[in-house]
Image (spheres, coloured by chain):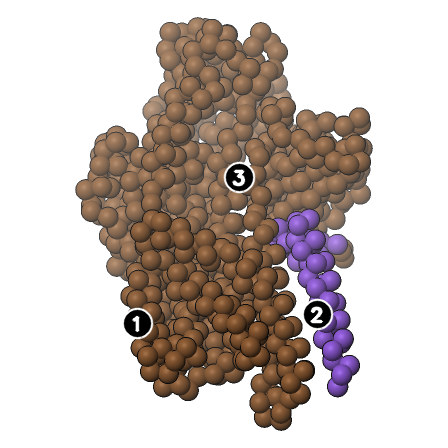
Chain colours: A purple, B brown
Amino acid sequence: MDALIFLVPIAIGLGAVFAGLFIAAAARGQFDDIDDAPQRMLDD
Amino acid sequence: MTAAPPVGRPRASAHEHACAHCGVIIEGGGSEWCCSGCEMASEIIHGAGLDQYYARRESPAPRPSPVSLAWDSVPVEADDAGGSRAALQIDGLTCAACVWVTERVLLATPGVREAMVSHATGRCRVAWDPTKVDLRTIADRIAAIGYRPRPLNAEVAPDRTLMVRLGVAAFAAMNVMLLSASIYAGWLDGMDAGHAALFRWATLVLATPVALWCAEPLYVGAIAGLRAGVLHMDLPVSIGVASMYTQGVYATLRGEDAWLDSLTMLVALLLAGRVLEQRGRRRAVESATALANSAPRLARRGGVEIPASELVPGDRIDVGLGEEVAADGVVVAGVARVRMSILTGESEPVTLRAGERVVAGAVVEDGTLAICVQAVGGQTLLARMAAELAEAADRPAPPTLTDRIAPWFTGATLVLAAVALAVGGPPRAMAVLVVACPCALALASPLATAAGLGAAARRGLLVRTGEALRAMAEVRTVAFDKTGTLTHGEPAVVAADDVVLRVAAGLERSSGHPVARAIRNEAIRRGIALPEAHDVREVAGVGISGVVDGRRWTLGAGQPGQVEIAGLGAITLRDVPRHDAARTVTQLRALGYRVVLVSGDHAEVARRIADAAGIEEVVAGASPEEKAAWVRAQGGGVLFVGDGVNDGPALAAASVGVAMGQGAASSVLVADAIVAHDGLGPVVAGLRAAVASKRAVRGNAARSLIYNAGAVTAALLGLVNPLVAAVLMPLSSSLVVWGASRVERWTR
C-alpha cells in the first residue's frame, strides 16, 4: 500500500496535465461556440 | 452526401419552369434562369463543384443583388501567417445547405484560406491572403450567390474564464470525491494514519484552487451585493464556501476530517449553473447585436462611391432607386417616392421634391434625389434617437425570488450556526454552516431561467436577459403596434385579375420595389408563370413599361391603393395582417391576456386591421410619445410588440419590449426580446416559457428550502458528518435540475 505515497501525487499530476490541456483549449476558443460543431459534422 | 431527387430545382410543364437558382416560375423557351444574376450564381456554384446544394437546400435561394456597403470599417486582424481575418454577418441563410454552400464558395475563392459560418447566428469568420484578395471581393462572392453579407462591428468575446473555472472545479471535485471516498472507507475498515494524512493533504491541494480561484465569481457577487446594500444569494454561499475551506485547512493540519468534498462539488455545480445561464443568454445577445449592427453605408458623391462616414455637411450626394439615404439633408434636385418606415413606422411612401428635408435611413422607392448633406454619422436623427433609446433601456434589474429569500436565509443560517456552537461546539456549528449552504437554492433560479430562455429561443423568441424572462411571467396586457408588427409592413395584393397579374409580374420580374415583390409573390402563389418581358424601362414617377406577348404595356399608379396597367386592369394592394396574427391573438386571449392594438395610424385603418386580427381594444392616432404614455398609464405588466424607431419609447417604457427581428435596428437595440421567426407565434411561446420558468423557479425554491430546513435540523441534532453532507448535496442539486428540466414540457 506504500505505493500510494507516490501513486496519488502521480495521479493528481496526470489529472493536472489534462486540466492544463483543457485550459489551453478553452483559451484558444475551443468552447466559444459549442452549438455549431454538431451541426457542421452533418454537412460533410 | 447522397444524390437526392432535385427538389430545389422544380421543373414545371414544357413551356414553364422554375428559375434554376431562385425558384421563381418563368415561361420557357429562353434561359434556365430568370435573370443574369441567378445565372451567374448557378455558374459560381457549379464551377466550385457544389451542385449538390440544389438537391439539399430546403428553400430556393434569394435572388442575388449587388451589395453597396463600406467594408473599410470592418475590424481586420492580422494573423501569424501574414494573412488577414475578419468577421461578417450573412443574412438569408435558412438551412444547413445554405451555410454549406456559402462556406464552400468562399473556400473556392482564390486567396481565401478559411471560412466558417455559424448555423446559429449567420456569423462568418473568414481568413484570407491580403496579397491575393480583399474583403470586398469576398463579400461580393457571397452576394453573387444570393446571400447578403453585412459588416460586423467588433464583437464581445465570450467569457472564457468562467468555462475554465468550471473545468478546474469539476476536475478537482471528481478527484476530491475519489480521495474522500477512500477516507470514508477508512472509517469502516481502518486506515493507516500515514495514508489518511496523505489523502487529506491531497484533497486540500486539489480544493485550494477551487476555493481561492474558481469560487471568485461567487465572492465578487456577494461583495457587490453588500456594497449595493442587497443581501444577494451569493452571500450565504460564499460564507459556506469560505468557512468550509477555513475548516478544511485547520482540520488537515490537525489530521481531522474536512468537508472539502462538499466544497468542491458545490462550487462546480454552481459554476455549471452559471455557464448554462450564460450560454442561453449569449445566443440571444449575439443574435440581437447581429440584427442591430447597423451597417456602415456607402454614399455617392460626385459619381464616386465613398463610405458614409467620410461625408461632411455641405456635400452633395446622389441617391438612386432602392438605395438608402446615408445622411440627413435637404433635397436639392429630383423627385422621388421615399419610404421612411424606419423612422415613422408608416408603410406608405411619401413623395419628396426639392427643398424638402430627408433623413438618414429613408429608402428611395422610385426616382432619384440629389441631397445637400446637413448632418452625418452620430448627428443624424436616426443615430440620436437610437442613442436616446439605448440609454432609456438601461434600467436596474428587479430582485429575483431567490434574491428576496437571501436576507432571511443568511440571517437564519447565522443564528442557527450560533445555536449549534452553543449546543455542540465548533464541529456542530461547522456542520450547520455546510448543510445550510444554499447550493440548490442558488442553482434553482439560474437553471430554471436557462431552461426558460432555451425553450423560448427554440420557438423563435430570443429573450435577452433572465430579468426580461421573469418580467414576462408578470405580463397581463399584450399590446401590438400595427405596421410591420401585426401586419407585414409591406403591401400585398388583395385583388387582381389573373391576366393583369401575369403581365404585371412579367414587367416587374427583376425589380426590387416592394410593390413588384408583392405582385411577383402573388403570381407565384397563384401558380402563374412569369412571362418574359423585353425592352423594360422604369420611368420615375410614371411606372414601368415593357413588351410582353408582343405588346407594350405600362404599369403605373392608379386609384389610391392600386396600380394599373393602362388598357388591361388594376391591381389592389394593401398592408395585410401577418398570416398568424389572428391565431396569435386567439391564443393570447385563451391564456387570459388582454390584447390591445396601439397604432399611430388613423382610427379607420387601425380598426380594419384589429378586426381582421380579432382585437377588440384599439388605441389609434398615437404619436411615439403617446404610445409610451399609454404603456405607462397601464401601471406595469405590459408587453409591447413593435418594430419601428417610432415604437422605441413604448418598447422602453413597457415592462417587456419585444421587437420584430426585421424591424428597425434601434428598436432591436432597446428591446428585451426579439422575434427571430417570421410571424407572431414566438410571442405566445415566449410568454408560455416565461410562466413555465417562473413555476419551475418556485417549485425549485420550495424543494431546496425544505431540503435545507431538514438538513439544518439534522445538523443541529449532530446527525450530519462530512459523508452525509457529501451524499445530500448532489441529491438536493439533482432535485433542482429535475425541476428545471420540466420547463420545456410546460412550455408546450
Q: Nearer the viewer, residue B735 or B320?
A: B735
Quick check: marks 1 and 3 in contact, CB under 8 Å? no
Foreground mark, 2 or 3? 2
Q: Give the tally of numbered discs.
A: 3
- Residue B391 visible here: yes
Residue type at numbered disc 1: Val
| Chain name for mark 3 | B
| Chain name for mark 1 | B
Q: Residues within 10 Å of mark 2 (few under 14, many from 20)?
A: some
Q: Nearer the viewer, residue B662 or B710?
A: B710
Q: CA distance from mark 1 to mark 2?
A: 39 Å
Foreground mark, 1 or 2? 1
Depicted B744 relative to depicted A34: above or below: below
Q: Mark 3 — residue?
A: B290
Q: Nearer the viewer, residue B86 or B316?
A: B86
Q: CA distance from mark 2 to mark 3?
A: 44 Å
Residue type at numbered disc 2: Ile
Please provide percent x and percent y for residue B324. Answer: 50, 22
Marker disc for residue A12: 2
Q: CA distance from mark 1 to mark 3?
A: 50 Å
Please provide percent x and percent y for residue B511. Answer: 55, 26
Residue type at numbered disc 3: Ala
Q: Residue at x 40, y 50 (%)?
A: B224
Q: Nearer the viewer, residue B17 or B447?
A: B447
Q: Residues within 10 Å of mark 3 (few under 14, many from 20)?
A: many
**Seen from this angle, which residue lies furthest bottom?**
B189
Quarter of the image where the N terminus of chain B is located? bottom right
Foreground mark, 1 or 3? 1
Marker disc for residue B415: 1
Q: Residue at x 70, y 70 (%)?
A: A12
